[in-house]
């Protein structure tokens, strides 16, 4: 009971940090909420509003961005007339709801794991940083947490309704941010694995999930075909995979020391370094133009990364084939792989935000083992 009290204090501290950060941004540096991509999201939000008023002209949304977050901005910012600072506050509230969903994902018998998982979600620095900007991260990770919650429920009771819910939440998350586009196939494969020898039920359930995910994603692809003559979900890969991605990177390498490596060694070194950058960089609060916030972010950020890494390592070392942990590890490895393949040397802590629910649950479990409470 004593450790639960400490974790509750951690949660209270995390919420307080977000509140203080919001007040600082609102009072001192409101311009910091606009990042390089923010104006593009607002332009596409305006395209939604134009479509609402004159649907006969069609939706003039860009092919580059997916429509989920821009629709969110259109409703809350342009239709309900909430100022952009209120959108930031709403995104911080979504962080809290994400923590609640992660808390609810853990069975009630593991209350200490659930509480610590929620605390890790709220304390995550990149998640806080990108939630304080007009960016997709807060909405995306919230919907992803609902996907994790629904699929864990499905694992535990095998009811098709929970799988259908997981498929819908995954589909919505892809509309917000396309990084999870191929996760539906991984989910379908895991459903087959889950049912084992009961192959007919497994195939039927997997097909339901795949139809729900890719059937609804296909609607937007059809829109892009009609509007741009391009049957793709987004052409963002031209700015990420084609320019920065790890595939074919050796032929595009300009660093003489790296180019001197044999191709196999080059890719082993590159992937290893990129994974280290992705999974250990804490995030930078330089956007606030405040020395105090930057020092706080660096000091707290590195300590927090060390903290959750310790728990994660223990959880992986003590891995005993728990089916839920297998699923969490699968999703975690998926997002790591996509981040490395698509961005290579340009990977940043921003690409770790979708992993926060999985990291939080696994790391919390590891810490409970380390403390002798499991």
Image (spheres, rainbow, N blue to C red):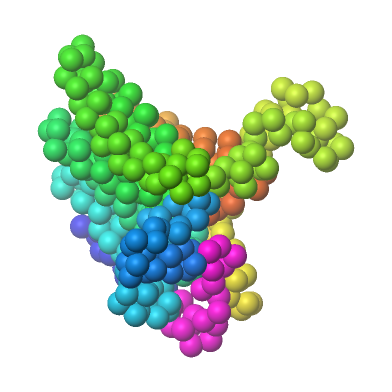
Asked if 370 appears above or below 39 in the picture, the reply is above
Q: At 37% from the left edge and 74% from the top edge, which residue is drawn?
A: 77
Q: At 27% from the left edge and 49% from the top edge, which residue is drawn?
A: 146
Residue 225 sits in quarter: top left
Dominant SS in magenta: helix
Indicate whether residue 38 is drawn in magenta. Answer: yes
Q: Is residue 163 left or right of residue 318?
A: left
The C terminus appears in which quarter of the rendering?
top left
Q: Is residue 279 left or right of residue 374?
A: right
Q: Is residue 265 left or right of residue 163?
A: right
Identity of the residue furthest to the bottom in this view:
27
Indicate whether residue 252 is drawn in magenta. Answer: no
Identity of the residue furthest to the top in this view:
197
Question: x and y percent of residue 299 in the render?
Answer: 57, 64
Q: Nearer the viewer, residue 140 or 172?
A: 172
Q: Is residue 179 left or right of residue 240?
A: left
The N terminus appears in which quarter of the rendering?
bottom left
Residue 217 sits in quarter: top left
- Residue bounds of the magenta highlight: 19-40
Residue 90 makes an appearance in the image: no
Question: x and y percent of residue 216 in the render?
Answer: 30, 41
Asked if 44 appears above or below 114 in the picture, the reply is below
Question: x and y percent of residue 198 in the render?
Answer: 17, 14
Residue 218 makes an appearance in the image: yes
Q: At 14% from the left edge and 33% from the top edge, which residue is drawn?
A: 160
Asked if 68 appears above or below 166 in the picture, the reply is below
Q: How many marks?
A: 0
Q: Nearer the viewer, residue 71 or 171?
A: 71
Question: x and y percent of residue 186 in the render?
Answer: 37, 29
């Amino acid at each position: 009971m004593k450790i639960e009290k400490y974790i509750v204090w951690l949660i209270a501290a995390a919420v307080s940090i977000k509140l203080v950060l919001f007040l600082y941004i609102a009072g001192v540096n409101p311009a910091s909420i606009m990042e390089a991509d923010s104006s593009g999201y607002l332009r596409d939000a305006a395209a939604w509003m134009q479509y609402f008023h004159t649907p006969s002209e069609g939706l003039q949304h860009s092919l580059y961005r997916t429509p989920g977050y821009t629709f969110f901005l259109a409703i809350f910012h342009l239709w309900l007339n909430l100022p952009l600072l209120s959108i930031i506050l709403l995104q911080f509230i979504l962080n809290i709801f994400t923590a609640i969903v992660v808390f609810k994902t853990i069975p009630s018998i593991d209350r200490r794991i659930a509480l610590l998982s929620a605390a890790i979600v709220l304390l995550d620095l990149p998640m806080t940083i990108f939630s304080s900007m007009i960016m997709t991260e807060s909405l995306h990770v919230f919907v992803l947490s609902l996907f994790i919650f629904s699929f864990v429920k499905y694992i535990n009771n095998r009811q098709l309704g929970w799988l259908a819910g997981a498929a819908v939440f995954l589909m919505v998350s892809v509309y917000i941010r396309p990084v999870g586009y191929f996760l539906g196939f991984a989910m379908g494969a895991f459903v087959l694995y889950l049912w084992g020898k009961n192959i007919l039920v497994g195939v039927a359930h997997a097909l339901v999930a795949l139809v729900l995910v890719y059937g609804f994603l296909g609607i937007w692809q059809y829109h892009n075909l009609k509007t741009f003559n391009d049957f793709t979900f987004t052409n963002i890969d031209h700015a990420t995979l084609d320019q920065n991605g790890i595939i074919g990177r050796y032929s595009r390498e300009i660093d003489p020391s790296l180019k001197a490596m044999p191709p196999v060694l080059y890719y082993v070194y590159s992937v290893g370094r990129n994974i280290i950058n992705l999974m250990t960089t804490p995030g930078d609060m330089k956007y606030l133009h405040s020395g105090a916030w930057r020092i706080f972010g660096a000091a707290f950020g590195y300590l927090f990364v060390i903290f959750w890494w310790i728990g994660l390592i223990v959880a992986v070392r003590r891995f005993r084939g728990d089916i839920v942990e297998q699923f969490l590890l699968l999703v975690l490895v998926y997002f790591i792989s996509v981040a490395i393949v698509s961005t290579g040397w340009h990977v940043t802590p921003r690409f770790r935000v979708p992993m926060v629910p999985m990291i939080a649950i696994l790391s919390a479990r590891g810490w409970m083992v380390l403390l002798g409470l499991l």
